Amino acid sequence: MKIAVIIPFYQREQGILLKALIGAFAQDLPIQTELWVIVVDDSSPVPATDEVAGLATQDRNRVTVLTQPNGGPGDARNRALDLVAARGADYVAFLDSDDVWKPTHLRDATNALEKGFDFYFCDHTRFDATTTHSSIIVSLTELSDHTRPGYQMIDARGPVISADNASVLSAYLKEYLSQTSTVVLRQSCVQQLRFDPELRGAGEDHLFWIMLVASGARMAISSRVNVYCGRGINIYFGSFDYGSVKTVNRIGYLFLFWDKCAKLKVADNDRADAAQMAQRYIRAYSYMFVRALFRGQRPDFRLFQTIRRRIPFMPVAMPFRFLSVLPRRREESKLW
């Protein structure tokens, strides 16, 4: 069995990637398992090669480092997926460079996938959280209801369950179910599917999981907390300061994400919900963009042009959207 581990890398603090790599090579796997780690250095201030040099020789020899101009995490993962497609692997596991796996993560994932499934994810916790992810995601609780049609128990010890694709797809279009470092895929189910490089700041992984489920990938969902998310650079979670221009960009990327979801071949009610979310975020983006200009800030105009290509008359409508949000800005901003 060959498992390819994909790590996009962009950090400013030394030792973060090394910790993730040590956790990857500490996995409790059968002796015949081949673990191949691909680190894509996305023009990181701390070079990936310096981090890899801290590994033991036998582990260092199992790491491939690719370098590229900064393109964001989705673009970096795509570079690695192309390499995996060329060289082959049975499974593909994703790991963000500031996250750490428990030693049982890949064993639990492959045990589930070996039962005929294509897409596995488990629960996780974060450095700043007192609860696990699944405990606050309503859709995961609903999918775990054993009386629901399509429910299947895979492993009662986890528990690890399966759910029908229509239910999982609908759940993904309501909430973000699977943090990237919790996901392990059967490589054959990926084929030519890739992360959307337009979504550099938010939603690129969420959309990828949705597209996988929509393509028919069979799900295995584990409640085991096998991933710990650390405190490194995080584009998404680093853009919640209301006064920062990064927040404008995050909201713009979320509009793109929901607009793309609204154009997928999904159930009518799911498509309508996605379209409603897209409308929410274009209102928010218009308000925050104009507000930033008033404050002398400069949002990302490349992102602005990307959105304008999807909504040609957006610049004309932005002042009106700004004015419509202005009286309710405190209430509406809680939704962003």
Image (cartoon, rainbow, N blue to C red):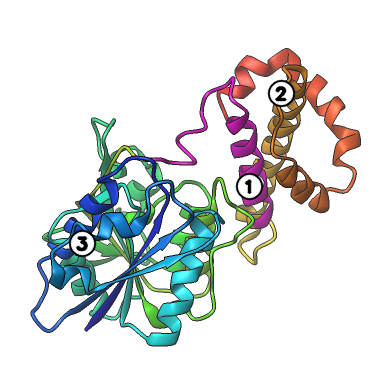
Q: In screen coordinates, is 273 left or right of 177?
A: right
Instruction: Looking at the image, tell me whether mark 3 or mark 2 is earlier in sequence order.
Output: 3
Query: Which numbered marker is on residue 292?
Result: 2
Q: CA distance from mark 1 to mark 2?
A: 28 Å
Q: Tag 2, which secondary structure?
A: helix
Instruction: Looking at the image, tell me whether mark 1 or mark 3 is earlier in sequence order.
Output: 3
Q: CA distance from mark 3 to mark 2?
A: 42 Å
Is 73 included in the stretch rendered in magenta? no
In the rendered image, residue 138, in percent from the top left (x then y), is placed at 38, 42
Q: Tag 3, which secondary structure?
A: helix
In the rendered image, residue 99, in percent from the top left (x then y), is placed at 28, 49
Name the residue carrying label 3: 24
Q: Tag 1, which secondary structure?
A: helix
Q: Quadrant of residue 253?
A: top right
Is 236 included in the stretch rendered in magenta? yes
Query: Which numbered marker is on residue 273?
Result: 1
10 Å neighbourhood of mark 3: few (<14), some, or many (≥20)?
Answer: many
At a point 60% along the width and 23% down the height, the residue shown is 333
Q: Amino acid at mark 2?
A: Ala
Q: Is residue 168 above or below residue 16?
A: below
